[in-house]
Amino acid sequence: MMNDIKWSKAEKEVARRAFDSAYERECGAIRAKLQEMTASASQPADIWEIHDYLSDRRRAVDGKYDYRYSVLIMVFSRLIEEGWLTEPDLLGLGADKIEKIGQIVSWR
Amino acid sequence: MMNDIKWSKAEKEVARRAFDSAYERECGAIRAKLQEMTASASQPADIWEIHDYLSDRRRAVDGKYDYRYSVLIMVFSRLIEEGWLTEPDLLGLGADKIEKIGQIVSWR
């Protein structure tokens, strides 16, 4: 079970940094898209389309970035699949964790 | 009662144009603020602040722009108070309506 995984102090630091990097990257992509949409907005409907876009992204991001150690392996697997994390970001995690993440990514 | 007010065809055209103009102006101001906020957004928190701003404005605008003839005198009064309409926009409405709007604006 994921709850049984132990995280050392050093691993927690790596995990926190990776998690924050992924969040920054994904928010950076949302910001770029927002800037693009805003620059070309000319009608009232364009504003509400931007609002719908941000509502959708906020819901997705809030649901995804869950920093509980009991779910972190699943979260990292998903972030890798979506391209917000790459393996080098996880350097420093134990082989047990890297292996689990690799299994989940390859299963799906 | 506001429900008793009769609107001629010509008045309905003036009302519709005034209503649409106010909506365009207010949405234009929201768009300008959105562009300003977006241009200076640098952190993830800035994106969610923009989302909060748009949620707030959308709720306000949706509640305010109610084009039912039974409430239109109240709506126009409010739009004048807030500066989205000016008296020249209402040229062509009957004296009864202009007077009612004037009374409501001066009461508050």
Image (tube, coloured by chain):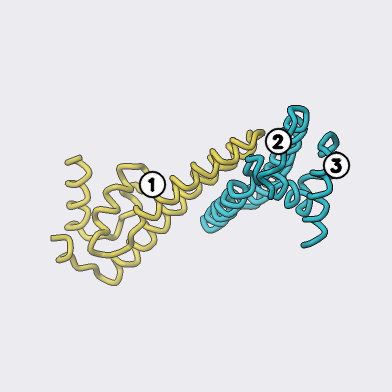
Chain colours: A yellow, B cyan
Residue on which disc 3 sits: B95
Q: Nearer the viewer, residue B56 or A24?
A: B56
Distance, label 2 to label 3, CA atoms, is 21 Å
Distance, label 2 to label 1, CA atoms, is 43 Å
Q: Is residue B42 visible?
A: no
Closer to the camera: disc 2 or disc 1?
2
Q: Looking at the image, do the residues carrying marks 2 and 3 touch, with CB atoms under 8 Å apart? A: no
- Secondary element under disc 1, as helix, strand or loop, is loop
Distance, label 1 to label 3, CA atoms, is 63 Å
**Mark 3, residues whose alpha carbon is within 10 Å: few (<14), some, or many (≥20)?**
few
Output the chain of dot 2. B
- Furthest-left residue in this view: A1
Mark closer to the chain start, 2 or 3: 2
- Furthest-top residue in this view: B9
For image coordinates 20% across by 47% down, the residue present is: A102
**Mark 1, residues whose alpha carbon is within 10 Å: few (<14), some, or many (≥20)?**
some
- Is residue A27 rendered to the left or right of residue A94? right
Question: The disc labelled 1 sits on which kind of residue?
Answer: Trp
Q: Which of A100 and B11 is in front in this view?
A: B11
Residue B92 vertical position relative to residue B61 in the rendered view, above or below: above
Residue on which disc 2 sits: B20
Output the chain of dot 3. B
Question: The disc labelled 2 sits on which kind of residue?
Answer: Asp
Residue on which disc 1 sits: A84
Question: The disc labelled 3 sits on which kind of residue?
Answer: Ala
Output the chain of dot 1. A
For image coordinates 54% across by 38% down, the residue present is: A49
Q: Is residue A63 visible?
A: yes
- Secondary element under disc 2, as helix, strand or loop, is helix
